[in-house]
Amino acid sequence: MSNVSLIINGANYEVPSNLTVLEAARTVGIDIPTLCFLKDINEVGACRVCVVEVEGARALQASCVLPVRDGMVVNTNTGRVRNARKNTVELLLANHNRECTTCVRSKNCELQSVSEELGIRDIRFEGAKREPKFDDASYSIVRDSSKCILCGRCVSACKNVQGIGILDFLNRGFETTVGPAFEMSMNDAPCIYCGQCMVVCPVGALTEKSGIDRVWNVLEDKSKHVIVQSAPAVRAALGEEFGYEIGTNVTGKLATALRKLGFAKVFDTNWAADVTIMEEGTELLGRLKNGGKLPMITSCSPGWVRYIEFNYPDLLDHLSSCKSPQNMFGALAKSYYADKHGIDAKDIVVVSVMPCTSKKSEIERPELSVNGLQDVDISITTRELARMIKEARLEFDKLEEGTFDAFMGDYSGAGVIFGATGGVMEAALRTVADVLTGQDLENVDYTAVRGIEGIKEATVNVAGTDIKIAVAHNTTNAGILLDKIRAGEADYHFIEIMACPGGCVNGGGQPIQPASVRNVIDIRAERAKALYSEDASKAVRKSHKNPEIKKLYDEYLGEPNSHRAHELLHTHYYAREQYPIKK
């Protein structure tokens, strides 16, 4: 790659010729503010906050889309530039709901930050405002157009990353808004509730539907036995809400915080992930031996399940019939746990802490219930848990390192890695390989399925049997694999699909990092490292070797895929137009 020479703020620099002015400035330590820019996702130069003055150009230039060239002279901090940026941001604020103290994104709002950095103290522009639209009809996502700044980041994430495109710019001029076609509700649009629009939104225009008040209420209800489960990816991100570096594992403090909030029992969804491997692995072996529908595809990610229901209903019989770990845990909590502890299942409230906003809608599906009781009662995100910890005035960094309750809390390393793309596949292979060989294999690291490549393919030879596998994350890549299956071009045996880029570690309910961080750090990879590190440290790294899982099957389920296991842990899916939506 050749270099070019240019002058930025009076100093000479040499930078790679493929950079934009924004990238070049940041490379040499000069920051330029942005709002709409999101590297590789939304590079449109729409907000004009990143403008710079270029010698020879009549107008100010948007640095995020302006290529560097040899001999270019750029000024990023002239009076003209500062005034233009201030005018732009003031105009945005003039039409913005500025009730910042009650906004869920207060102190983590990019508009708020850039306003402070630009020294804006007064809004000089007053006039008409767009009529706000508030949509909280879905179980997962709340859309508030009064806070939208029309940056387009959510539109690009939905369309260019997820390949769904239910969000777009509506109307024209001053009346422009962002939302689903025909101003329909997010509840009525073919949304998968992955929440990727939320994690890229710079303000509070898109947020999760809060379950915090419901959790506080049940915790104070003395007639209820309230237990909590926490998903694998939560431990890899929760610390970010309290100033920890991205990718810090806070498993011990997470367990302690949940206990101090008042839950009767604190469990780990990793345990249920181990159960999922027992059921899913056995289902795969059954399909391989008995000529079942192949490739079999994982069903852990509710956003992915909604995607196939909406877009590829003819391929639904490829899905595993397994419930997700969240719902397996809930079903067993209200049966196995209830029986062992002599508690009426009707008095048990199961709360889940998830990295996922689609989980909020998943728990409301009528087929995810047993004997008239929903598997899980309330699902909150990692962000919501952080808010509860702050409300309870717990000093997170000073909490002792605690542990999860046993019985439904002990887990293997295989359960931990469920939170990263490729983790479910690797966990399944560890068990399937042992079953096929009849041995306790020492090599449990299937690195071919790790990493953030969009689609990973491999052939694993186990006991003389070639198992062809594929792993995809984000629904654009899911669509590529499904098109191959539909065309008869896929000869895989087993496919793992996660709806979110990077898997659950980058779920829509995880802590939101500003574009300035997302543009330079691969959050997916850093958080995944925390999970693989914990996996490597575990004495037991295979789901079927977990003593608590053995006990579950010996004492209660009998064997994987048994009649009782199917009643509690398996389900079915619908073509979405046939889906009995719960109102």
Image (cartoon, helix red, strand yellow):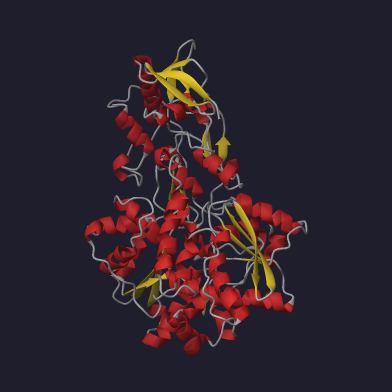
Residue that lies at the very extreme toward the right in this rendered image: 488
| Front residue (pair 541, 519) | 541
In the displayed structure, does residue 374 sit left or right of residue 123?
right
In the displayed structure, does residue 132 sit left or right of residue 182?
left
In the displayed structure, does residue 193 sit left or right of residue 52?
right
Location of the N terminus (image quadrant): top right
The x and y percentages for residue 400 are: 23, 65
Instruction: State which quadrant residue 380 falls in.
Output: bottom left
The residue at the point 24 percent across, 57 percent down is 397
The x and y percentages for residue 492 are: 70, 63
The x and y percentages for residue 44 are: 53, 30
| Front residue (pair 84, 436) | 436
Would you place residue 404 above or below residue 309 in this image?
A: below
In the displayed structure, does residue 317 sit left or right of residue 541?
right
The residue at the point 54 percent across, 48 percent down is 185
The x and y percentages for residue 511 are: 39, 51
Residue 367 visible here: no
Residue 252 visible here: yes
The residue at the point 49 percent across, 66 percent down is 363
